[in-house]
């Protein structure tokens, strides 16, 4: 899939988020990269669909002043591979992955996401 189309799907997934979440993402940049760097993954780089990098809201103090915005990266090649190239499935997985990474921004870890049924 062309990068431009993939990025459109990411933008649509972000726009579909409830307003109460969108209002708390001012300091978060959503990016698309082909694959993760070695520093971004531990283990198999092909299995990482997305990544949140930053300080979760639950860990910030009143004096928190970030120098850089938090970052959510979706990995296009990994998502496409995971979906077998199925465009409809790609759009669904983009939305799922984006919501998963946003949950990390709100301080929800993978164990809690599993408890919640992701």
Image (spheres, rainbow, N blue to C red):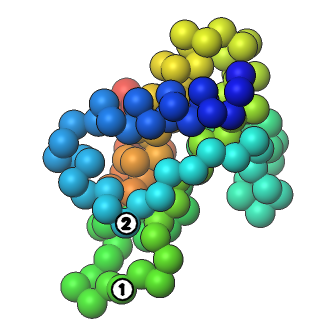
Establish if 68 lies above or below 43: below
Give the residue number, with chain letter if any, for mark 2: 27
Q: Position of residue 36 (x, y in %)?
A: 75, 50
Furthest-bottom residue in view? 63
Furthest-front residue in view? 4
**Label 2 crowding class (10 Å Cα cut-off): few <14, some 14-19, many 20+?**
few
Q: CA distance from mark 1 to mark 2?
A: 11 Å
Establish if 53 lies above or below 3: below
Q: Position of residue 105 (x, y in %)?
A: 39, 57
Establish if 44 lies above or below 118: below
Instruction: Using residue 43 as the reference point, say whether residue 101 is left or right of it.
Output: left
Tag count in the figure?
2
Q: Is residue 70 visible?
A: yes
Front position in the image: 25 or 114? 25
Establish if 16 lies above or below 63: above
Instruction: Using residue 4 as the reference point, say whether residue 116 is left or right of it.
Output: left
Please tell me which residue is depicted at 32% across the width and 77% down the height of the picture. 60
Q: Position of residue 117 (x, y in %)?
A: 37, 27
Give the residue number, with chain letter if any, for mark 1: 65
Please tell me which residue is depicted at 65% across the width and 9% down the height of the picture. 86
Q: Position of residue 49 (x, y in %)?
A: 64, 37
Please tell me which residue is depicted at 75% across the width and 32% down the height of the picture. 77
Instruction: Using residue 106 as the reference point, say whether residue 2 is left or right of it.
Output: right
**Label 1 crowding class (10 Å Cα cut-off): few <14, some 14-19, many 20+?**
few
Label 2 secondary element: loop
Front position in the image: 49 or 112? 49
Q: Quadrant of the N terminus?
A: top right
Please tell me which residue is depicted at 72% across the width and 13% down the height of the picture. 85
Q: Quadrant of the C terminus?
A: top left
Quarter of the image holding residue 89? top right
Q: Earlier in the sequence, mark 1 or mark 2?
A: 2
């Amino acid at each position: 899939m062309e990068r431009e189309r993939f990025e459109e799907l990411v933008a649509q997934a972000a726009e579909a988020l409830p307003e109460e979440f969108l209002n708390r993402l001012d300091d978060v940049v959503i990016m698309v990269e082909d694959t993760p760097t070695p520093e971004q993954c531990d283990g198999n780089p092909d299995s990482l669909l997305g990544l949140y990098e930053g300080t979760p809201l639950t860990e910030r103090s009143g004096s928190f002043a970030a120098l850089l915005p938090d970052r959510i990266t979706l990995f296009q090649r990994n998502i496409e591979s995971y979906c077998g190239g199925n465009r409809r499935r790609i759009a669904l997985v983009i939305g799922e992955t984006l919501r998963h990474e946003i949950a990390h921004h709100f301080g929800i870890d993978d164990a809690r996401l599993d408890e919640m049924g992701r």
